[in-house]
Amino acid sequence: VWNEQTTGTTAHNLAIRHKKPFQMIGPENYLNILQNHICTSVPIFDEKEEVIGALALIQKLTESPWEHDYHKISSYSLGWVSSLAAAIENQMKLHLSNQSLFQVNQKLKKNKQILKATLEFIDEGVVTIDSDGVILNTNQEGSRILALNQDSSEGRNISEFLTSRSTLMNIVS
C-alpha cells in the first residue's frame, strides 16, 4: 500500500491530506523510483465532500527537463487529471440520484397498486382524469357506467362520453 509511512511524500498523499490537486516533478518526489517522473494527483470527493481517494497520473520523463528547459514539462496533465476526477465525482452523484429515483419509482408503483385495489372496493363509479380530460384510471363500476372494457378505457378522453353542457367539461381544457 502506498501511504506516507511506506513511500514518503507523494502527490497522491498530499492531494488526499490537503484536499486539493498536487503535481510533483522529478526530484520533488521522495521515492527514488519516481525521481524521473511527473506525478499528478487530484482528490476525489463523495457527496458529503469527504475525500474517498485520489486519481493519480504518473508520467515518465525521458530526460531531466528541470535542469534545462522547465517549460518542456507536460503542464496539461494537472488539468486533465482534474477534469477526470470531476467526471468521476459527477458519475458518482448521478448514480446516487438514479438510485434515489429508482426507490421513489418503486414506492409510486406500490402506491398505485394500493390505490387501484382500494378503488375496486368502492361501489360507486370512479373515473380518474388528468387536466386535459384523458382517462387515467377507472374502477369496475366506472367502466360499466361508460360501457367500456376496464383495460381499454385508459388513454381515451372523457369528452367522448359527456355532452358539451356537462359541468365537468368546463373544468377540463
Image: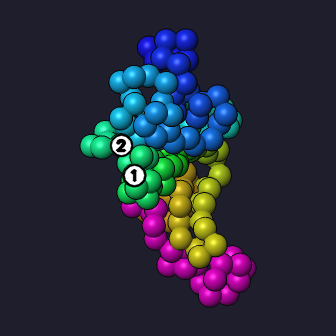
Residue 78 vs residue 35, the one in the foreground? 35
Label disc, if present, on residue 138 of the rendered structure: none
Mark 1: amino acid: His
Q: Is residue 6 left or right of residue 18?
A: left
Q: Is residue 42 above or below residue 33?
A: below
Determine crowd level at label 1: few under 14, some 14-19, many 20+ residues with C-alpha closer than 10 A: few
Residue at 49 percent of width and 12 percent of height:
6
Residue at 65 percent of width and 78 percent of height:
172
Q: Is residue 56 magenta?
A: no
Q: Is residue 156 magenta?
A: yes
Asked whether the residues under the numbered discs 2 and 1 touch, taking CB atoms below 8 Å apart as contact, a structural biologist would say: yes
Q: Is residue 130 left or right of residue 27?
A: right
Residue at 50 percent of width and 38 percent of height:
24
Residue 44 seen by the camera: no
Q: Which residues are magenta?
A: 152-173
Residue 78 seen by the camera: yes
Residue 173 vs residue 25, the one in the foreground? 25
Label 1 element class? loop
- Quarter of the image with the C terminus in it: bottom right
Q: Which residue is mark 1?
A: 68
Residue at 55 percent of width and 79 percent of height:
159
- Quarter of the image with the N terminus in it: top left
- Residue 75: percent from the left, percent from the top? 44, 55
Mark 2: amino acid: Ser
Label 2 element class? loop
- Residue 29: percent from the left, percent from the top? 48, 30
Q: Is residue 120 above or below residue 141?
A: above
- Residue 125: percent from the left, percent from the top? 61, 55
Q: Which residue is mark 2?
A: 64
Name of the residue lying farthest toward the front: 68
Quarter of the figure with residue 128? bottom right
Q: Is residue 95 above or below residue 172?
A: above
